[in-house]
Amino acid sequence: MDKPIQKKFWTPGRIGLIVCILLIIASMAYLFASRSGKSRLKADPSRMTFSKIGYGEFREYYPFDAKVEPVTSVYLDVETGGRVDEIFAEGGKFVKEGELILKFSNAALQRNSIDTESRLIETLDAQRNTQFTRAQSRLTNQDTLLGIDYQIYSLEQKRSRYEALAIEGLIPRQDFEAVRDELEYTKNKKILLQERIRQEDLLSEKQLEQAKLSIERLNLSRDLLTKTVESLEVRAPISGYLSSIDAEVGQNIAAGKRIGQIDLLDKLKLSAGIDQYYIAKVTVGTKGKFSLEGTSYPVAVQKIYPEVKDDKFTVDIAFAGEVPGGIKRGQTVTVELDFSESGKSLVASKGGFYNQTNGRWVYLVSGDRQSASRVNIHTGRQNPRDVEVLDGLREGDWIITSGYDSFNEVDTLVFPAPVQLN
């Protein structure tokens, strides 16, 4: 009799199917768990820099390079321009006031000077001719007027005699009337001559006044041209040290170009360009210091130039005390400008992390030294070395201060072994 064959429940195919299902479930569970939890990254602490949070003296300052410059400088700007004929002084040498430094030639300017001088001479000649003609005319008119006055006097005497004779009938009446009419004509002629003299005097005065104004204008033009011609000889306006001359013999230089400067080295200052980020913090009187050959010297901001160029504004800084004996014009020193008083604060070293987080968060090392977790912090004042911690960290905490570029902002860094921190 045949026995029925019983089928096995755990067949190889069924077992394989169940294993696949379990693997899928486990993978999905792991994926879900990894996405729902904090991100972690294994990291090598030997490539990191760690710093301890603690209280210490904190000073908010900004270091910058400042250049030593003279307080007083006089620039040498070309007034007229022209061709450089001769150079008499070298850059870096001491020059005395009035000493000839450089000489130009300008043919057009010299022609203008000659033309102006010629016009002035012509106008002066015309004025003299006008005055001479006026004097001759006045003499002639005065002589004529004197003759008319004599005629009037003679005719008045003659009229009186003729009038008496005409009344007695000794002469004809028409003879008396002829003398009377001649007298009236001569008097009218005198009036006309006097008006002519008055008109000529007015005209001559106007001509002389115009000539005078022309002469004044020409004299002014001549004086200006003379000064301009004199400016072709560049002389030292003050006694001092001449900078390098930006000119060569034979070179044509346009008017207004700066070819050098003269410095008074009895007083020096520092000039520096500061990042515009600090423009609200820097004021006149802001104090600072710089070191030279191991000695610290106090300084203070003296003048602020508000114009921002290439993201920087310029300040003049004065020495607040003794001027270093060995300091030279053109030398560069590093000045630390103070923005607050020194005091106790909770501080952290300012490493590469600050560039990535801008002081908003850090990696805080755990108590067992096996990991570092991301925590948010609040920072305040800063200087190139340290940053003030206002919230988020405590004294004694250790943080990673090296750069965070390779961590992809994960939540936790896991170390293969506890970190040794000193």
Image (cartoon, helix red, strand yellow):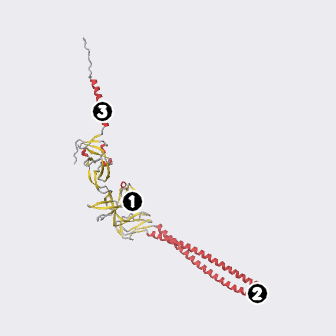
The image position of residue 360, as x and y in percent, is: 32, 47
Q: Which residue corresponds to mark 1?
A: 305
What is the secondary structure assignment of the residue under circle 2? helix
Q: In the rendered structure, find residue 29 and report the number of the disc placed on it.
A: 3
- Given contact means CB atoms under 8 Å apart, are the residues at marks 3 and 1 in contact? no
Q: Nearer the viewer, residue 159 or 359?
A: 359
User: Of the numbered discs in the image, which one, if any, rests on residue 263?
Assistant: none
Residue drawn at point x = 53 percent, y = 74 percent: 124
Q: Quadrant of residue 33?
A: top left
Kindly identify which residue carries mark 2: 167
Label 2, label 1: how far apart the Cα atoms are: 107 Å
Label 3: element kind? helix
In the rendering, at what x and y percent does residue 342 appear? 29, 56
Q: Earlier in the sequence, mark 3 or mark 1?
A: 3
Above or below residue 96? Residue 189 is below
The mark nearer the N terminus, 2 or 3, is: 3
For label 1, the SS is: strand
Q: Up-down: is 401 above or below 262? A: above
Determine whether 21 is above or below 98 in the image. Answer: above
* Foreground of the two, 254 or 55: 55
The answer to whether residue 135 is visible is yes
Q: Amino acid at mark 2?
A: Ile
The percent coordinates of residue 114 (x first, y second) are 49, 70
Q: Residue type at mark 1?
A: Tyr
Q: What amino acid type is highlighted by mark number 3?
A: Ala
Q: Is residue 247 visible?
A: no
Q: Position of residue 251 (x, y in %)?
A: 41, 63
Between label 3 and label 1, give the one nearer the viewer.
Answer: 3
